[in-house]
Each structure stands twice: as structure tokens, then as C-alpha cells.
Amino acid sequence: MSREPRVVIIGAGMAGITALHVFTRLGFDAVTVLEKASDVGGVWHWNRYPGLTCDVPSQLYQFGFAPKADWSHLFADGPDIQRYHREVVESLGLGERIQLDTEVVAAQWNEDAANWTLTTKGGDRIEADVVVCATGVLHHPAVPDLPGLDEFAGAKVHTARWDDSVTTDGKHIAVIGTGSTGVQIVSALQPAAASITHYVRSPQWILWAPMSLRQSKLATRVLSRSPTAQDRLYRTLLWASGILADVTTRPSWRRRAVQGYARLCLRLQVRDPALRRKLTPDYQPLCRRQVVSETYYRAIQSGNAELVTERIDQVTPSGIRTADGCHRPADVIVLATGFAPHNYMRPMQITGRDGRTIDQEWAGGPRAYRMTAIPGFPNLFTMLGPNSPTGSISLQYSAERTAEYIARFLRMLRDGVATSIEVTEEATEEFNADVAVAMTPTVWNTGCNSWYLTDNKTVDLWPYDRATLTSMLAEPELSHFDIR
Ligand code: NAP
């Protein structure tokens, strides 16, 4: 008996849009996306802080199925990328399948019916044969537990929930955190601030790149007129990004060259030895998510900027006191303190076969089979789930391959070959054991503390190259699945 599977994708960010497009392109009609926000775009909807820019070239940071010829810059800013997401949804006619302002809070597997019941925050119950969690990685803001933070009398804002009513021009600004976000926001706010103090607990290596370069009119004209040229450029960039996968996953002269460049960037841009010492990390370049900036070192050396590496002792109503007893006044505190990246679809309550919950399944840390299937949770898949290549391979490319992989299972459900599909425990264990071995020579495993690490200090990334990702997601190995 063939039946059109009812598919619910949770999340309308980059991965959710990809899954929706791929499934509908392959002829699946009963596909709906539920999105808790009031707009599509995911991370690019939620993050709207000043200076937000993508450090991946625009001509690569796009969907393979929706090339954009006319990016304004070589590295697009946040609003441009968000506009692109809206345009793609509109031009591909995907909008009518996306239900905004709909937060899924629970999903329950029904063994007899071989389907899922989803419960929304508004209390609606929705049945689905297949659930695809495209809920993102860098989504849940991490707010630090700093003594006195609640008593601060000025404005305080986390970068991932930027509040447009907060004014920063002419103000004394304190920025806490020095990941990609902290570095971008210090660079953006410094010119108009009365003063800006950057509180840095662990310095990061910062690669210089020409982030402000505009895409030339000639390039836009050529790419607009020639889809072949656009395709070639995209493929060349995909290929070139393979170098990043190579330098991060295997020790080589290439890795040493990039690391040498990182050290050179610091040496050439910061002349004061004392400041340079404070800005020098105690781990290898590339070990953490690499920070890229054209302007940070210039900003932090400006007359109105100060780098503070002393531990924060207390937030007072009027500023921040560090462990050396020094108190610096602040009007605004910006928390560039990152995310809880290993939550994935949680705090959604997901209950699979035999009443097993996702929290129980992931008590020892998140794990999946090939980034997308979880034992005990039939007909449920993740997009950019555990071990996804957030540190090395185009996420749009990875998402599209994952969606095509999931579509092969949708076909089995549609053709009546199966009613439930669940990855086995053995296959998941074997995959994760292989990943652990492959992770050994990666640069992420060289002793730094980063958001790539789970609570039990395993690296939650993809240790292989793009070709391996492509082949692992090409065709399901059915012996790895319990198909009923
Ligand atoms: P992050 O890299 O996790 O950095 C968080 C920062 O906050 C770290 O410097 C951390 O210090 C600091 N911090 C946290 N708690 C603290 C506390 N209690 N006291 C003092 N400092 C504290 O977060 P992020 O900068 O938001 O970046 C997350 C990821 O988002 C990036 O790695 C990247 O993948 C993505 N992103 C990308 C772009 C882009 O251009 N494509 C832009 C922004 C973000 P420690 O290091 O000591 O923990």
C-alpha cells in the first residue's frame, strides 16, 4: 500500500529550508515546516547585532540550488543573508508550507500507528509520519552566571537576542566574550563609543581577511548572465573549502602554514608587546572555531578601547569589578558569551520507542548515526545533528546531502515498503567509535576549550572530508536499520 508520508520539518532556518525544498523537488507533497519565530532564516533571524557578518565567502555561503549572483560584498552581512533566505523561500514558492509562530514543545512516537504526535506551545496536536528536526546548533544563548549581573542598572543584552532599543553610541560599553561574535561587535561599536572595554577570558587567534570588500560590478554582471560561470565559481569555492577540512582534520605543512599566518596576523597588527602577550592564546591556531576579522586589532588598539583579561569578579549596578579590584563603569553590557550548542532540538520533549526520551538517550552526550538518525527514535531525523561539519565543510552542502538521504527513507514509506525506520544501536555505536578514532589527529583535539566540545569533552564535529560525507549520505545501508 503506498501512502504519501506526512512530513513535519521543525525549523525554517537554512537546514529546514533545504529539507523543504529537497523533499518537494523530489515529489513529496505532504510536507510542512513548523517554525517558532515570526520569520524564516533561523540563526540569521535571531542574530541581529551590530557588525554581524558572515566570515564564509558569500558565493559559497548560499544554497547550491539557489545561487545568487549579486551579493553586495565578498563576505555578506547578516541583513543581506536574511534577505536572501526570504527571497529563496518566495522564489521557490515554499512559503505556503511554512507555518510561522508555531513552537513545537513535544513529540511522542505512537507505536501502533507508527507515527508521531507533535504538541505545539499553543496546545495544538499535529500528526506526522516523519519528523525532521532542523532546529539548528547555535540557537540557545548561553547567559553567564556572573555575580550581580541581575542588579546591573544599565542596559544588558545578549548578542543573539539583540534589542534595537539599546543605544550604544556615545556610551561606555562593556563587551564580554571574544568568539567570532565578540570580535565583530567590538569592531562595530568601538568607533562611536565613549569607551569600550573588552573582557576576554581566553584570547582567540584572529585571522585577517578583507571582510569589507565589495563584489565588483563586473563580477555581478558575469555571474548574472552566465549560470555556467556561477556554477563553476561555486564548485571552485566548494573545492577550495576542502582545504579547510584538510588542514583541520590532518596534521600537515598546510595546517602549519595557516597556523603561521594566524601568528603573523597578531604579530604584524599589534606592535605593543604587552598587549600582544595579552592577546596571545595558549593553544594552537584553528583548535577553536577560527575567528576572522579585518578590523578587530585596530579597534582594540584605539584610544577609547581597553582589553581586560583579569577575571570578572562582580557586576555592580554601575559597571564591572575584576579580580584585581579595579572597577570600570559601564552604561551597556553586551554578552557575547555564545550558545549551548549541544542542546540541538531540546528543550523539546521527544519520546521515542518504548517511552525512551531524548534526554535519556543523550545522557552521555548527543550522538547520532551519520549526523541524522538516532536509535530508539523511528522515523525521526536530524538536519545538521551531532557530528555535523560546523567547523570545516559548507553547511548548505551538508544539509542538502542529508535531506536527499532522508528522502530515500521517505520513498520507502511512500512505496509501502516500510512503516517505520529506525537506525540500530550497533550501527550507531560503530559509527561513533569510528568518529572517535578519526577525531584523534584533528586540530580540534589539541587541548583547547571550545564550544566544539561536549560536556564529556568529546569533539562534536565531522572528522572526515567532504567526499566521505557525500558517500556516507549517498545511499542508506539498509542493514544498519530496523525496518518494519
Ligand atoms: P563563542 O565562540 O562560544 O564565544 C563565547 C565567548 O564568551 C568566549 O570568549 C568565552 O570565553 C566567553 N565567555 C563565556 N562565558 C563567560 C564568562 N562567564 N565570563 C567571561 N567570558 C565568558 O560564541 P560566539 O562568539 O557567539 O560564536 C559562536 C559561534 O557562532 C562561532 O564560533 C561561529 O561558529 C558562529 N558565528 C559565526 C559568525 C560568522 O561570521 N560566520 C559570526 C558570529 C558567530 P572562554 O573562551 O574563556 O570560554
Image (cartoon, grey):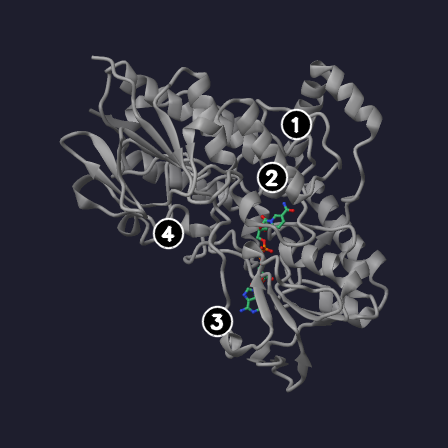
Under circle 2, the secondary element is helix
Disc 4: residue Cβ within 8 A of ligand 1's nearest atom: no
Mark 2 or 4: the one toward you: 2
Q: Earlier in the sequence, mark 3 or mark 2?
A: 2
Residue 302 visible somewhere in the drawing: yes
Left-right relation of 443 to 214: left
**Does any atom of ligand 1 lie closer than 8 Å to the CB of label 3?**
yes
Judging by the rendered image, the residue that carries numbered circle 2 is: 82
Frontmost residue, 52 versus 458 = 52
Numbered disc in front, either 4 or 3:
3
Residue name at image x 50 percent, y 27 percent: 400
Q: Residues within 10 Å of mark 2 (few under 14, many from 20)?
A: many
Is 290 displayed left or right of 33 in the figure? right
Instruction: Say above or below: 93 vs 138.
Output: above
* Residue lying at 52% horizontally and 55% vertically, measured from the top left: 451
Q: Where the N terminus falls, by quadrant?
A: top left
Disc 4 element: loop
Calculate the distance from the C-alpha at mark 3 to the C-alpha at mark 2.
Answer: 31 Å
Specify the amino acid type for callout 2.
Gln
- For label 3, count other residues whose C-alpha is less than 10 Å away and answer few (under 14), some (14-19) or many (20+): few
- First of labels 3, 1 by sequence position: 3
Kindly indicate whether the residue at mark 4 contacts the one at mark 1 (C-beta within 8 angstroms). Answer: no
